Amino acid sequence: MAFMDDHFILSTATAQKLYHGTAKSQPIVDYHCHLSPKDIAENRRFEDLTAIWLAGDHYKWRAMRANGVNEDYITGSRSTAREKFQAWAETVPHTLRNPLFHWTHLELRRHFGIQEVLDGNNAQKVWDEANRQLTHGDLTARGILKMMKVEVVGTTDDPADSLDYHHAIAKTNFATRIVPTFRPDACLKVHLPERVKAWATRLSQQTGRGADTFAGLMDGLQKRHDDFAAAGCRASDHGLDYLPDATCTEAEAKAIWENAMAGQAASAHETEKFMAFIMLHLGRLNHAKGWATQLHLGPVRDPNLGLLQRLGSDAGCDTIGDFRQGPGLIRWFGTLSKEQALGKTIIYNINPADTALFACLPGSFQDGVTPGKIQYGSGWWFLDQERGMRDQMNALSDLGLLSRFVGMVTDSRSFLSYPRHEYFRRILCDLIGTDVETGRIPDYPHWNERLVADVCYQNARNYFGFKA
């Protein structure tokens, strides 16, 4: 079998039929990503391949560092865009069996039609051809979304962010729906008074209400929640170490917040209590609007203090955390369920040790009304590769209903990342096709084709209410 031919990953005839006949043609609902709404609003034309492919790509940065590439050629200012690309091209052969090797060549093929295997020797040729298309063709921010049949994009937005770019996009006739996602993580940093005070000032500017008081914070979150809803928001998103197994009264939350506004750092215990209060509050707000709550749990952020000092946060140094996830999740789900305020929820784990827990827990809180109301989310971040995707779908199949799964998230800052949906779809079809050909599930094409179409597209479209 040739490298990355039409049947790439599809190991059986049934898998090939399911992919080419059903999965391949499905549109994309990209309900969680980090694309720039500014780039979409302005239909950015990227200046070169480094700008669209390497800038901000933590996965590639990590691989280059592991390959011994000097930071000057990764994030530094003393190298040119062409030199950075050369360093990446020379790293690619060393990524064999890393998902980056597959993603790199899927992206070159699907976006640019470049079939060559990238290395240092052909870097100039690839650079010239990709840049020709970027500067003269249809590969603008909007052009890529159209080409990849992206029906919906859910960007990730802080409540203190302006929604002006979303409003500007909505006034155009752009076919892809661009909606914000409510990401209020910054308000939980009460152990870092200077940071949370700066954020409160930004929130106050957006709402016209002083968020330096607890009442102002609550009013501000409510107002921005309403503003986001008016802009088409369908979900919140939360990137946390874990949900705390803690309780907190309103009076306690008020004291913690106002102490932080006065410059007094919350203790670890107080931070957990405040987080527990706010997360329950947000869960109730989401339930009232029919939004989904997305809980991305488990990373350790910025452990490399040297690079943190040099480059700041989000430099590609985060890692898998080893946190106890069960008690806090069970308390959060149980409290909202008891109040009849538990809305649609998706939970994502970053530590594979938590896979069975995250796959099983949703089954304890389904309501018997909304199909797949509580979801075990797709393989995410360090589990966003073939093994992680297979493990997630197998665990979900064992302990829940794969047929109700809302499928892949791109979770990327790069407009070139959409072939990852193809990667996911090929893996899904390979799983189903193998089960058919080994007699584990019946060879009922209408059942299996529906399952594939639902997981690739229809379930997400229905779950988030993006029906036409």
Image (cartoon, rainbow, N blue to C red):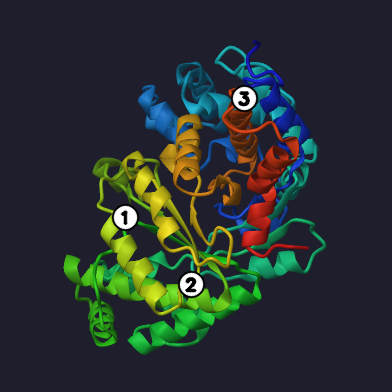
**Residue 41 placement: quadrant:** bottom right
Q: Which badge, 3 or 2, comes first in the chain's sequence?
A: 3
Q: Say which residue label 3 marks.
A: 105
Q: Amino acid at mark 1?
A: Asp
Q: Amino acid at mark 3?
A: His
Q: Is residue 402 left or right of residue 263?
A: right
Mark 1 Cα within 10 Å, few/some/many (few <14, many 20+)? many
Looking at the image, which residue is at 63% across and 28% down? 436
Task: Identify the secondary structure beneath mark 1.
Answer: loop
- Residue 88: percent from the left, percent from the top? 51, 25
Q: Name the residue rendered at 78%, 33% in the picture.
A: 21
* Position of residue 260 measured from the top left corner of the image (x, y, whole percent): 25, 77
Alpha carbon distance from label 1 to label 2: 22 Å
- Secondary-structure class at tag 2: loop
Tell me the kind of residue under disc 2.
Ala
* Residue nearest the viewer, comparing 410 with 403: 403
Give the residue displayed 62% in from the left and 20% down from the top: 11
Q: Which mark is residue 160?
A: 2
